[in-house]
Image (tube, rainbow, N blue to C red):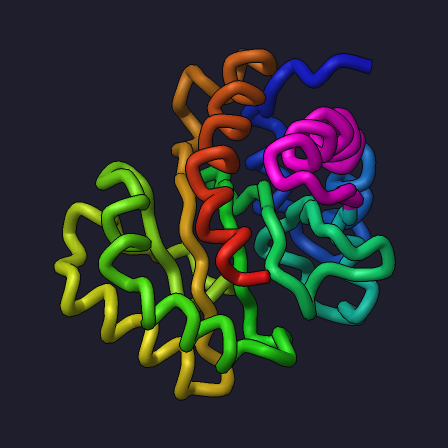
Amino acid sequence: MIFNGFSEQDFQTFLIEGLDNRMESIKENIQPKFKELGDILCQDISGFSGVEMYLHIAKHLRRTVNPPKDTWLAICHNKRGYKQHPHFQIGLFDDHVFIWLAFIYELPNKTEIANAFLKDATNIYKTIPPTYVMSMDHTKKESKSIKDISKPEFIQSLEYFKNVKKAEFLIGRHVQANDELLKNGEAFIEFARETFKTLMPIYKQSL
């Protein structure tokens, strides 16, 4: 199987009413693409990091009533799970694709990671291209462009990540659903590959 990109139908999945119907569409339309995409990028990220990586595809098993408003794949060095570790994500909301290096609230060593980032905040800030975006909550669509975040604001965000239990730190890129890039599988893979390679120094610093 070859990854051929994302389609309008993939994004319309999140307009389907009901948990069972929406999950059926996610399983039939999106998860096979995640498998194709994830298998390729796992190899790339393993090469960039020097660590063997494993693909995880969100199953949304805890949901019993409310259908998921987004879905994702995660790539992590841990075979059993990803939420308690720094990891890479690609996923969809109804209006965009997100590509993240993610540090979410389940991290048991979140404080230590935040301290490491704060010690080197100036260099990290310079590492992130201005076209990238940042979020403090993976459950929300909203993000802020790095070009609109000053260095003091960036440091303040890292302090928030450190001190607030539910705070998260996600850096990456968003691609709007109508972007032609998403229709070209090879081009999107290269776009994601470039993103993860750019963010790799930050990932390595967190380990």
Q: Where residue 37 sits: x, y (%)?
A: 69, 27
Q: Which residues are magenta?
A: 29-55
Quadrant in which the C terminus appears: bottom right
Q: Nearer the viewer, residue 125 or 102?
A: 125
Question: Is 13 on the left or on the right of 52, as rendered?
Answer: left
- Residue 60, quarter of the rendered image: bottom right
Q: Nearer the viewer, residue 81 or 115?
A: 115
Residue at figure coordinates x 40%, y 39% from the top left: 174
Q: Main secondary structure of the magenta part?
A: helix
Q: Is residue 167 above or below residue 98?
A: below
Q: Is residue 191 above or below residue 103?
A: above
Q: Is residue 51 above or below residue 206?
A: above
Residue at figure coordinates x 72%, y 60% from the top left: 82
Residue at figure coordinates x 45%, y 39% from the top left: 96
Is 93 inside the magenta-drawn segment?
no
- Residue 114, quarter of the rendered image: bottom left
Question: Is 64 on the left or on the right of 136, as rendered?
Answer: right
Q: Where residue 152 sits: x, y (%)?
A: 14, 68
Q: Where residue 91 sits: x, y (%)?
A: 59, 43
- Residue 5, quarter of the rendered image: top right
Q: Where residue 49 sits: x, y (%)?
A: 62, 41
Q: Residue furthest right?
A: 80
Quadrant in which the N terminus appears: top right
Residue at figure coordinates x 72%, y 34% from the top left: 42
Number of numbered markers: 0
Q: Nearer the viewer, residue 193 or 142?
A: 193
Is 35 inside the magenta-drawn segment?
yes
